[in-house]
Amino acid sequence: MVLRAVRWSRLQIVVSCRGYASQPRRPQRPQRPTTTILERERPEEEQQQHQESNTVTKVKRPSIPSTQSKSSIALRSISKEKGRGVGLATLGQQTSKPVESKEDLILDTSPRTKDGKKKHIDYDYTVRPYTYLYFAEENNFEVFSKYPVVTSKRLATVANSRGRGPLPPDEFGRPADLRPRKVSMLTRDFIDDSLYNPQYGYFTRQATIYSPEKPFEYNSLQGNDEFVDKWAKSYVRYDSLVAKTTRAHTTNPLFSDHSTTSIPPLSQNQMDLPQLWHTPTELFQPYYGQAIARYVLLNYLMTLYPYQDLHIYEVGGGNGTLMLNILDFIRTTHPDVFSRTHYNIIEISSSLAQKQASAALQTKIERQGFTDKVRVINKSIFDWDSEVPEPCFLIALEVLDNLAHDSIRYDNQTDRIYQGYVIVNEDGDFEEHFSPEIDPLAQRFLDLRERVTPGLDLTKVRGHPLAKSKWRRKLRTWLNPLAHDLSLPEFIPTRYLELLDVLNKYFPQHRFLTSDFTSLPNSIPGYSSPVVQVMLEKQMVPMHTYMALQGYFDILFPTDFGLAAALYEEIIGRRINVLSHEGFLNKWADVEATTTRDGENPMLEFYQNAAFMCT
């Protein structure tokens, strides 16, 4: 039996007159369904078939389908991108069209009539961001199994086969879209594809990292308040970038709106506004990078010098600021070590890799004499296939939070585990299914967690789905007939296990240093659940689900560093330490340089919800 949860997955946003993306509309509770589809036009033949079908067209309220029913009323996610979007639909019916090859299934992006012709339909874009959850019928396994299961790696291969750059528009003048349809994938693959797909992934096309024009002079600032004021004023130069992007998209015919609906859909120029995010490396440069350099230098001098060269690998190099700060500090303090230093950046994001290889950065590298020291590798760390036999330092700052997780739920009656899948149907909308069949990687994590945390009682872990007493979980199901009999989701870091496998296999003598968030506000419901957000009007707007339009939303997870350290020691076989963000910087940073006149220290006092893990 497969459990299904169908989610509303898109966000309705209104275009403001200034060209910026405005605040989202306040979501309204969905009206009780009176029809099964809200398309404006329907062919006469399709209407006749619709009337003759056994689909219920007038329902007082959504209910749990019976085991005899051959169709079920379910809410289907709204799609806003490029003229797509639906309201209510009947799920569980087989399509009459023969199943194509896997590649055709992935790349089919246009609705068709029965004779195979493409059709352009205007949709209702009403926002109903709520979820109805229930037990699915056993024969709904056909819905779950009729689509091929793909992986994020397979989708990336298909995207790369089409080449980089914009694709020509379709016959309706809409931009071509490589986002998959008629496929099924594990939750981790959906998240990984949303973030890292080479054509439409968030880090490929959206992310812009904030960097101040020059370092802040903390000793001249009165306190944290003045620091925040100067920080806010430094965003002004990014306004011109937003305005430039908006003008470019406004004059581009590919991004014109073809919808006639009375509710303005999300325009492409809004969707493609740069997503600006900041890191402590940029915010507290050069002092933050110098703290990392001190850690690397001391460990190198104590254990490897003069027998080995200093090899540094940075995963996710961003703007290249950390690399510049580390190399500059090493050259200034230890010229003899600098002559033996080799710095490698492993950057999965092609846009950021291009930025690191840009003329401006290359000029800075050449000016500072780092030309023969730096190598940018535009490759995912998960695709690494060559051994690095020499001792090295591997740095991964704010990388763990964007590693994809799997979603699991627990049966409220038996505590049986169900694993989450995301189905992308023929309209490009999302459905969440849960299967009792656990894939090997998720099962490996569950087994490892039990091994490295002996005596762990999940019923006593605060916030865990099993922490609620069983009778309370049963009562919730009894009181809410719309809810299925599953707990809230738990997100497990399966992709982190794959990272550890890569380090163990290809970097056998590495020293590991990583930093990330221990907790995050505004996360979606669940345990260890992510924050899904998009920047609009210079503010981060959180979503209620991870099933959002791929590539337009940042998805970041908190890290349980206690569990992460235990898994590292189990797989790598080497001890690793966990320090608070403030504790690490107090030990390795020049804290006097970032202290204000009032004695406050933004570098120590900000990012209280972060930690370091280092060997």
Image (cartoon, grey):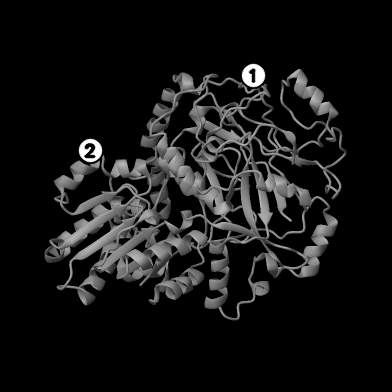
Q: Where's residue 531, x and y in %? A: 55, 51
Q: Is residue 68 left or right of residue 9?
A: right
Pick whichever of labels 2 and 1 is earlier in the sequence. Answer: 1
The N terminus lies in which quarter of the figure? bottom right
Which residue lies at the image location 18% right of the left edge and 66% below the top edge?
309
CA–CA distance between discs 2 and 1?
44 Å
Residue 357 percent location from the top left of the image: 26, 42
Q: Is residue 304 left or right of residue 554?
A: left
Q: Is residue 202 visible?
A: no
Q: Quadrant of the C terminus?
A: bottom left
Residue 90 location (% of width, % of height): 76, 37
Is residue 267 visible to us here? yes
Tell which of 392 and 582 is nearer to you: 392
What is the secondary structure assignment of the residue under circle 2?
helix
The residue most toward the bottom is 455
> Front-most of 434 and 407?
434
* Pick the front one: 610 or 48: 48
Amino acid type of the residue that numbered disc 2 sits on in the rendered structure: Ala
Which amino acid type is marked by label 1? Thr
Q: Quadrant of residue 509?
A: bottom left
Residue carrying label 1: 260
Q: Where is mark 2, residue-wise? A: 359
Query: Badge 2: how crowded within 10 Å, few (<14), some, or many (20+)?
Result: few
| Residue ID at (67%, 21%) | 262
Question: Residue 77 in the image: x percent, y percent?
Answer: 67, 39
SS for tag 1?
loop
In the rendered image, the vertical position of residue 254 relative to residue 457, given as above or below: above
- Looking at the image, residue 491 sits to the left or right of residue 114; the answer is left
Residue occupying the point 63% across, 45% down: 423
